[in-house]
Image (cartoon, rainbow, N blue to C red):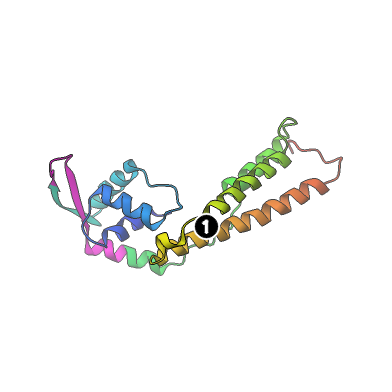
Amino acid sequence: MSLVELHLALLSQGPAHGYDLKRAYDAWFPDAKPLPFGQVYATLGRLVRDGLAEVVETRSEGGPERTVYTVTDAGRQRVREWLAEPAPPAVSGTEDLVRKAVVALRTGDPERPASAFVADQRVAHLRRMRSLADHDPGADADDLGSRLARRYAALHLDADLRWLDEAATALESRPRHEPEGPR
């Protein structure tokens, strides 16, 4: 994920301070991990340093001091260039799900076999799919971005579940002489 370009895109909606950006990010990507405040402000500092954003004002309004940022022309250009490049397909085996399954298989813990990991992960994925299905569709009915993000999450979970089913089948059908453990 490119936080630089995401921050710039959020700023392209109009001048904002860090709290506004965090709130907007969390609204744009409601099912993603929330953006930490520290990351917002560190990224804003780099954007200003690199000339992609600038400070337009600092205000207090009776509370903590808030610095308001805006995107520069160079920042808008950076977002255009980023959007022009297709995102690489996420087909690597470096996802946590795959890494944990391989580690569970390779380490061969007799008290916690890989099949237990696969079964538990499947339950967690099904629980997450149910929470997506239980989401009130009216809550973001007019927000195409939120609907698309939720649909992506559901389809991604479905693909993971299919892979977990294949992993469970492979574990069940492996020859008995092929133990789990280091190779």
- Can residue 10 be seen in the rendering of this structure? yes
* Relative height, residue 102 to residue 107 (above, below): below
Residue 166 placement (x, y as % from top left)? 73, 54
Quadrant in which residue 2 is drawn: bottom left
Using a 10 Å C-alpha cutoff, classify the residue at mark 1 as few (fewer than 14 neighbours), some (14 to 19) or many (20 or more): some
The C terminus lies in which quarter of the figure? top right
- Work out whether residue 140 or residue 14 is closer to the camera in this orientation and state it: 140
Residue 16 placement (x, y as % from top left)? 22, 54
Give the structural element (helix, strand or loop) at label 1: helix
- Work out whether residue 63 or residue 42 is closer to the camera in this orientation and state it: 63
| In the displayed structure image, the side of residue 109 where residue 46 appears, left or right | left
Q: Residue placed at 55% from the left, 58% from the top? A: 154
Magenta stretch: includes residue 66: yes
Q: Residue placed at 34% from the left, 44% from the top? A: 39
Magenta stretch: includes residue 41: no
Residue 29 placement (x, y as % from top left)? 41, 56
For disc 1, the marked residue is 153
Residue 58 placement (x, y as % from top left)? 14, 47
**Direction bottom: furthest residue:** 84
Q: Residue placed at 16% from the left, 40% from the top? A: 63
- Work out whether residue 136 or residue 44 is closer to the camera in this orientation and state it: 136
- Residue type indicated by callout 1: Ala
Q: Residue placed at 27% from the left, 64% from the top? A: 76
- Can residue 4 be seen in the rendering of this structure? no
**Direction top: furthest residue:** 111
The N terminus lies in which quarter of the figure? bottom left
Q: How many numbered markers are drawn?
A: 1
Quadrant in which residue 64 is drawn: top left
The residue range painted magenta reads 59-78
| In the displayed structure image, the side of residue 172 where residue 66 appears, left or right | left
Quadrant in which residue 182 is drawn: top right
